[in-house]
């Protein structure tokens, strides 16, 4: 298996989890929490998509998809490119209100397609390129991609778990 195929498979698994977590859910279910103080399915999927959009855009030295089109409006949010959900309070998280499951899927699929384009052209040398010197050791492209995938998989799993609980109520 080539490195590109491996990374595409890794990120493709996120696609499956995102769709499983939100397909067919109402806007109400997307914003319901399983317990006070926890994150909703809508927030979890919005956040994992924002993180991927934010980080991949930086790697591409391009604008985030969040800033184009009507993505922010479909979530009841301003188009702040720095708002990825990191550090959100319960009140902040409750403001993420996707208009429906399709809004989450559409935004995620657009971001995932952009990520796949990057992954298709990565070389072995690219993976060793330093992309963030704020850390010790500095972060390489390979490490950043694994970090994004890890974060996204965790949140997609949380969203799927929350869905299972909500559907049993």
Image: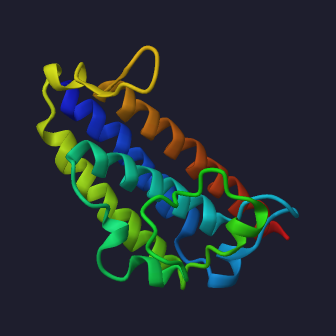
Please report the residue visible at 40 percent of the width from the left and 63 percent of the height from the top: 108
Looking at the picture, the colour scheme in use is: rainbow
x then y, percent, for residue 18: 49, 58
x then y, percent, for residue 45: 54, 61
| Residue 76 found in image quarter | bottom right
Residue 120 relative to residue 161: left or right: left
The foreground one among 136 and 168 is 136
Residue 120 relative to residue 166: left or right: left
Please report the residue visible at 43 percent of the width from the left and 27 percent of the height from the top: 134
User: Height in image: 17 above or below 141?
Assistant: below
x then y, percent, for residue 142: 31, 26
List the single residue furthest toward the front. Answer: 134
User: Height in image: 154 above or below 168?
Assistant: above
The foreground one among 79 and 71 is 79
- Image quadrant for the C terminus? bottom right
The foreground one among 152 and 143 is 143
Residue 37 relative to residue 72: left or right: right
| Residue 43 found in image quarter | bottom right
User: Height in image: 9 above or below 125?
Assistant: below
Please report the residue visible at 69 percent of the width from the left and 63 percent of the height from the top: 163
Please report the residue visible at 47 percent of the width from the left and 63 percent of the height from the top: 19
């Amino acid at each position: 298996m080539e490195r590109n195929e491996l990374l595409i498979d890794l990120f493709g698994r996120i696609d499956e989890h995102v769709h499983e977590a939100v397909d067919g859910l109402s806007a109400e279910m997307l914003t319901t929490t399983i317990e006070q103080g926890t994150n909703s399915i809508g927030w979890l999927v919005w956040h994992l998509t924002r993180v991927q959009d934010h980080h991949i855009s930086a790697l591409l030295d391009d604008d985030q998809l969040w800033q184009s089109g009507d993505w922010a409006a479909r979530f009841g949010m301003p188009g702040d490119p720095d708002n990825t959900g990191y550090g959100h309070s319960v009140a902040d998280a409750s403001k993420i209100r996707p208009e429906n499951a399709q809004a989450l899927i559409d935004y995620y699929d657009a971001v995932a397609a952009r990520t796949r384009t990057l992954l298709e052209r990565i070389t072995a040398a690219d993976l060793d390129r330093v992309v963030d010197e704020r850390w010790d050791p500095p972060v390489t492209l390979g490490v950043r991609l694994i970090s994004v995938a890890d974060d996204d998989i965790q949140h997609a799993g949380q969203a799927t778990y929350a869905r299972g609980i909500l559907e049993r109520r």
